[in-house]
Image: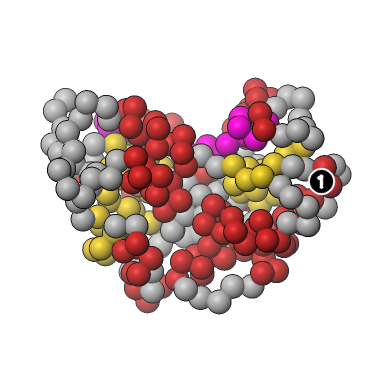
Amino acid sequence: MTVAPDAPILFFDSGVGGLSILAPARAALPTARIVYAADSAGFPYGTKSEAEIAARVPALLGRLVERYRPRLAVIACNTASTIALQHVRAALDIPVVGTVPAIKPAALLSKSRVFGVLGTDATVRQPYVDRLAAEHGADCTMLRHGSAALVQLAEAKLRGDPLDPQVARDALAGLIDQPGGDRMDMVVLACTHFPLVEQELAAAAPHPVGFVHGGDGIARRIRYLTQGQPWPDTPAPGVAVFTRLDERQEALRPTLARYGLDRIEAL
Ligand code: DGL
C-alpha cells in the first residue's frame, strides 16, 4: 500500500493522557502529521464497564479512520487497549498500536522484587495485567491500585487549574499501604494520564520509587511500523479532535499548541 507523505498518525485517548504517548512519538518523527483524538464525551473510561468500552472504542476509531485516513492508529490509553485492542484491530485495515502496562521493564528494574501498578480501576482488574505479571514478574510481588482522581489531576494540570497535592499522596498510598508496599521500589504508570503528573507523584512518595511507562517503546514501534514511508519535509500542523467540545477543551488550547496541535475540531 502506498502512503502519502501527509497521511497522519492517529492517537486516541479518553482525554489528554495520550499526550504522554504523543510526545516521544513526535520527538522520533518530528514532521509527521498528527491527529490527536480525545473522547471527551465518553471521559472518563476508567470507571466504565468492559462492555461499554468494548462497544464504544472500535466504533469511534472507525469514524476517525474514515474521516482522517491515518497511516497508523495508536490507542494511547491503557484502559481502551487492555479491553478493546483486539476488537479495534479486527475493525480496521491499518496497523493499530496499543498501550499496555509496562510490567516487563518494572520487573526487570525492581531490586526489591516488589513493584506497583497504578492505573484506572478498569485497567488494574484486567486479566491482561495478570498475564503480563505471570510472564515477566513471576518472582515479584505486584501491588495494584486504581485511581480516578489522579486522572482528573492530570486533566486539571494541563488545563492550568490549581492542583491538590493530596491526590498524588492518596494514589501512592493505595499501593504503599498494602502488604509489602514499604519495599516497593518501582511503579508502572499504567494509565497514560499518569506520566503527565509524574513530578507530583515523585514529590508525594514517602520513599524513593522509580516510574516506568510505555511512551518510548511505542515511539520505537511506530517508527518500525512506518519505516520506508514518506513524511512531510517540514513539521505539519496537527489537529486535536474531541467528541464533545466545551470550555474544558477550550482551556486546553495552550497545552495542545505545545504538542503541535494548533487546530481543534469536533467529531
Ligand atoms: N488515559 C486512560 C488510560 O490510559 C484512561 C483515563 C480515563 O479516562 O479514565 O487508561
- Left-right relation of 214 to 262: right
Relative to 116, residue 104 above or below: above
Rendered-image quadrant of the N terminus? top left
**Residue at (24%, 36%) from the top-left corner?**
71
Identity of the residue furthest to the right in this view: 179
Q: Give the vertical position of 116 relative to 43 (above or below).
A: above
Q: Is residue 260 left or right of residue 189?
A: left
Q: Mark 1 falls on what kind of element?
A: helix
Which residue is rendered at x = 65% and y = 48% of the image? 118
Q: Left or right: where does residue 24 sit relative to residue 263?
A: right
252 and 219: which one is in front? 219
Tell me if I can see residue 108 in this picture.
yes
Where residue 228 appears, as percent x and y from the top left, is 22, 26
Would you call the spot at circle 1 few (<14 residues within 10 Å), some (14-19), or many (20 or more)? Answer: some
Quadrant location of residue 127? Answer: top right
- Scheme of colours in the image: secondary structure
User: Range of the magenta residues?
Assistant: 92-107
Q: Residue at x 15, y 43 (%)?
A: 233
Q: Can you identify the residue that label 1 sits on?
A: 181
x, y (%) of residue 79? 52, 45
The answer to whether residue 102 is magenta is yes
